[in-house]
Image (cartoon, helix red, strand yellow):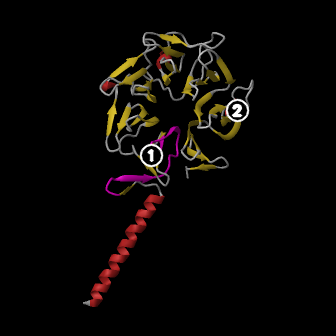
Amino acid sequence: MKNKRNVLYSLVIMLTGVIGFSVQCQQKKGVEAVAGIKDTIITHAPNSIVRTIKQDAKGNIWIASWEGVFKYNGKSFTNVTSNVSSARFFSVLQDSKGNFWFASVGSGVYYYDGKTFKNYTTKDGLANDRVTNIYEDKNGIIWFGTEGGASSYDGKSFRNFKMNEARPPAASDSVHSSAYQHPLPENSWMHNDVNAIIEDKTGKFWFATRGNTFTYDGNKFTPVTNNDGKPFTNVRCIIKDKNGDLWLGGADGLWRYDGTTFTNFNQKFVGYIYEDKNGNIWTSSETDNKQVWELSRYDTNSLNNEKPIPTVIANKPMIFGILEDGKGNIWFGDFDGVHRYDGKTITDFNQ
């Protein structure tokens, strides 16, 4: 009898080892593995295009990618949307109430309270299901930049804004087009394809589109022009710095607006702009080799120089989603995932 118990005990130990080895292999290969009662999915970091990186109030890093929205807690990555949607995600925002919003191209926006998801689409009043950016204004209204105009959401209903009444063609794809050789006609649908939204220090809203950039005073849209009267076209990013100045980046390069005058810093295509806690301005921009982009830093002490020269940190085939985390590291995304710069070396998380 004792021998039988020993044999049974040995079989249990062997079986436990086999199961444990199988789970380890699954995790190493990136196969979805369930951990804990919350059914958390532990997976690899994104290996495809990363567009936006944000840090939440608890210090977690959130990454919007074409594989889904990932959360990094400092130790492991979790694909939060893997069981929710297979859409390409472009933006993520934690609102002032602590809830999250995810923008997708084709499936509208997703609201996430940390436990459950809710999907908003054109059926709920959203202007278009192709959404690339999210912004919260000073009153807590959530704005969405879509291919068919801007949508604001007050927690109950959507209100939509169009710069003109043109509609996008059924086969349009705002992902791939970046710059244009000829001025767009005033009735082009691209003037409704919103790349960025921001509220300036006077309370006016700025809408950057694939066409022109507009300001909105609550009554009408006004095209934004530079000092020479030329409209800003295909602006991809607008930020407001600590001084309240606006920075615009796009097909016309990098510009700063102090409320009166525009100053040009770079005439090459700029895809993303970020201000760190020290007031340095980080950009992603094209190089003379159109296949390579630069991650660059304009030091705050040089911003008022006549011709400030940025420091080039990295070269990648397109760069988006720049973020400074709580420890001072700079995160950025590109075609093959997410990277972190600690001031000396760059760590790749796509392995």
Q: How far across and down, in percent of the image, does residue 57 sit?
A: 45, 42
Task: Give the quarter of the image for residue 146.
Answer: top left
Mark 2 lies on a secondary structure that is: helix
Classify residue 59 as left or right of residue 114: right
Neighbours of disc 1 within 10 Å: few (<14), some (14-19), many (20+): few
Discs 2/1, front: 2
Camera-side residue: 142 or 176?
A: 142
Say whether residue 230 is visible: yes
- Which residue is pictured at 41% across the width and 31% down the height? 106
Task: Give the quarter of the image for residue 97.
Answer: top left
Q: Is residue 57 magenta?
A: yes
Camera-side residue: 98 or 336?
A: 98
Q: Is residue 54 magenta?
A: yes
The magenta stretch is 36-63
User: Which part of the image, by quadrant, shows the N terminus?
Assistant: bottom left
Vertically, is 8 above or below 47? below
The amino acid sitting under disc 1 is Lys
Q: How far across and down, in percent of the image, does residue 219 sit?
A: 43, 10
- Which residue is pictured at 33% across the width and 53% down the height? 38
The residue pinned by badge 1 equals 58
The residue pinned by badge 2 equals 301
Camera-side residue: 265 or 25?
A: 265
In primary-sequence order, the first of circles 2 and 1 is 1
- Which residue is pictured at 63% across the width and 21% down the height? 252
Q: CA distance from mark 2 to mark 1?
A: 31 Å
Neighbours of disc 2 within 10 Å: few (<14), some (14-19), many (20+): few
Q: How far across and down, in percent of the image, does residue 61 sit?
A: 49, 45
Q: How far across and down, in percent of the image, does residue 276 sit?
A: 59, 37
Vertically, is 53 above or below 305? below
Mark 1 lies on a secondary structure that is: loop
The amino acid sitting under disc 2 is Asn
